[in-house]
Image: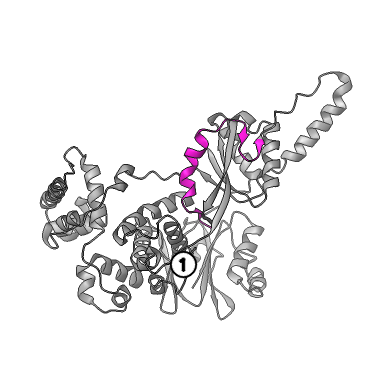
Amino acid sequence: MDQTPQDIARTGWTLVTLRVAWTLRSMGIQPRGSILDAARRHVWMQLPADTPVHVAEDRAEQFTRQFVAHGRGQRYEPPYPGDQHIELKESWRREVHHARSGAQGAVMLHHYANGLPIHKLAATVGCDAAALLAAREGIRERLRFAAASDDVSLEKWSEARLDHLIHRLANLPVEPPPPLLEVVDGLHPDKVNNCLRSRRAYQLVRRNGLDKAQLRPPAANPRPDAKVRFLALHIHPDGRRHLETLRRSLQVRHIPRGDSTLLISTSDPESIRQTLHLAAEVECPSREHMRGTFLEGTGQWSRFGLLGPLPETVDDKIRSLSWGQVEGMGELPEPLPPPPSTTRSWLVVTALILLMAGLLSRALAPLPPPVAHPLRVVTTPARGGMWVEFDVHDQAHVAVVREAAGHLEVLVPGQSPVDKANHATGDGRFRLHTQGQGVAVISSASPLTGLADALRLAEQQPESLKTLASALQKTDSTIDVVWDTL
């Protein structure tokens, strides 16, 4: 795709990256590494080159929330979708940002911009909740007045709808920030307290591990131009009980969209055709319960799902399709006829049963045992290594292994549930600091007796922590392993 100097992907790179990272953080997701890169590519794929910077910042939050929903296999339902097209006039932004201190300033920053509820804000700033509620009502009234001056009436809007619009305006201060790369280096300290964008950039880099290089636009080709083609397959409610069986039968990459649609990669079209035909013939689900079409355009598969605008067009595309037909693949076959019931047909019946059992054995294979004690792990780079914080069942056997200078070293042996006690924080979690380039946390229901052998084999591989995790989980599927590297 041709790049122009005025492309928002270049001129707005820093501010849009900051908004994407802050939105991820507000959703409890560490905004760094591949997930930040994927979320940002998802945003750029949906912003035209001539998008104004303040509009790009505003839409970046919506598209980032959309990215997270897609990665979780959910449909994204934006609040008040029709309001996304309302112009966020500079006069409105100036009106709601008029107060930078006092109760209204605190409400704008902490309540509207950052989403802190009023009762928690009162406890945080030591202010009476009634004064904060009055300040919030004052901000609402100022926006109603500013909109009325532009012949836009907000009088009949609900408070929730009005507050959502103020949230968007609160995140778009009128004054441009200083160079954010200078801010995160410690320059402009006054702006960290007085400028919303500067404050967020400083916090993300200094406290949340955001690589400040992410705020610097690349030398060339900042806008992604990847193309993708996939099959959107919709399953009727009466056939949803077969959805998981169908998913296990697919030989290609796919992700769910809600509870009735699959987005399927077309990397192997013949494999898809065979799977769908077999499913229709054995009514798992039946042809009358399937319909689909192929979509193609700007997009890209990632480890977090399908990036780009196409997933949001799926519902409209498949709504008009007839059941039993996949556009681009033709009509699905009718179910296989029932076997004859005469005595002379027993051999045919037996052969058919064996054939169907063989075809369905893979799809109906039992799932492996679930993880015994799931881990929740957060890693934060610091002091030449990283802080590791994890939460797990008290009876879990937990081992911690670090990677340093090409070697794997056991920090917590995992031979007893009490091995982790020295690292308890007192609130049910555990925390420790480790030097090196990476760390793996391992949870098991029993002592990790084969850990030493697994370490020796993993050290011989280029990605030793990844190899270690794969080997342990292959040996025992009830083991949970979370690993990370700098």
Label 1 secondary element: helix
x and y, in percent, of residue 372 in the image: 55, 52
Seen in the image, is 106 located left or right of residue 424? left
In the image, is residue 293 above or below residue 38?
A: above
Q: Residue farthest to the bottom?
A: 405
x and y, in percent, of residue 165 in the image: 24, 49
Seen in the image, is 82 located left or right of residue 424? left
Q: Is residue 324 magenta?
A: yes
In the image, is residue 383 above or below residue 293?
A: below
Whether residue 387 is visible here, answered yes or no, is yes
Q: Is residue 224 magenta?
A: no
The stretch in magenta equals 302-330
Q: Residue farthest to the right?
A: 344
x and y, in percent, of residue 243 in the image: 59, 38
In the image, is residue 173 above or below residue 296?
A: below
Observer-nearest of 352 and 312: 312
Observer-nearest of 439 and 36: 36
Type of residue at label 1? Gly
Q: Which residue is mark 1?
A: 33
Observer-nearest of 338 and 219: 219
How many C-alpha atoms fall within 10 Å of the one at disc 1: few (<14), some, or many (≥20)? few
x and y, in percent, of residue 221 in the image: 47, 68
Whether residue 72 is visible here, answered yes or no, is no
